[in-house]
Image (tube, rainbow, N blue to C red):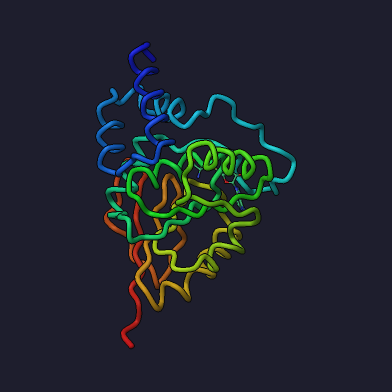
Amino acid sequence: MEEALWRSADGARERIARGARPPAWFRDALLAIPAADRDAWLDATLGLAEIPDDGPELPRGCVPYLPCPVADLLRVVERSSIGSADVVVDVGSGVGRAAAAIHLLTGAPVVGLELQTRMVDASRALAARLGLAGISFELGDAAALAGSVDAATVFFLYCPFGGERLATLLARLEPLGRVRPIRVACVDLPLPPCDWLEADEASPDGVQVHRSAPRPR
Ligand SMILES: C[S@@+](CC[C@H](N)C(=O)[O-])C[C@H]1O[C@@H](n2cnc3c(N)ncnc32)[C@H](O)[C@@H]1O
């Protein structure tokens, strides 16, 4: 990244830490960066120079930490129409990068669920460093925890796991989706068929939003 972009990231970080961060400002600042530099700019803005290694807590079948590309985060926010009235759950939140980006882009509170202690520690440090009270993180198996996040309206999944665990997660979300509209936004993660979720038209870029159709009362 060029010197000017590092300076831009420093300025953005200082502004975020001062609390002067309306979503429209952050979005414009991010979109002003050349597309090829946006991931590096976001890392620099959030102060994510050092990423903890994955630890031994990750069970078989669970995917290690890999940051979701900014291009996909922008697609998720746009296609799920996330706004400040939403409550977003990042299922497998890693170091909190996607949670922070979604929060800054939309103003929505984001709850990250993460199995690895080091990742949760890093996420909480990120939130504290930048004064982001709108993001919070819980340690545990997201498949078990996701259904209990109060008022959640959007579940974001950047391929944290598949198979049985994904089926368990969807079974936990079904009672929510049956009574209120929720969106399940997936990146590179095809969902098994669910009769309570309807997928938006498939897109070749790997970002797909599924919407629940609550039963009429
Ligand atoms: C591909 S990374 C995605 C990170 C983040 N959501 C992002 O988009 O930048 C998957 C993350 O899910 C976490 N993970 C995997 N299985 C999990 C589980 N069962 N419960 C909670 N977190 C899990 C991993 O530790 C890892 O941090």
Image spot of residue 185 (x, y percent): 39, 54
Compared to 130, does 159 lie above or below?
below
Residue lying at the far right of the rendered structure: 56
Q: Residue at x 30, y 26 (%)?
A: 35
Left or right of residue 177: residue 61: right
Residue lying at the far top of the rendered structure: 3
Image spot of residue 12 (x, y percent): 37, 29
Image spot of residue 114 (x, y percent): 60, 50
Q: Residue at x 40, y 36 (%)?
A: 16
Compared to 51, does 98 lie above or below?
below
Q: Residue at x 37, y 74 (%)?
A: 180
Q: Residue at x 48, y 37 (%)?
A: 130
Quarter of the image where the N terminus is located: top left
Q: Nearer the viewer, residue 65 or 40?
A: 40
Compared to 13, does 192 lie above or below?
below
Left or right of residue 132: residue 208: left
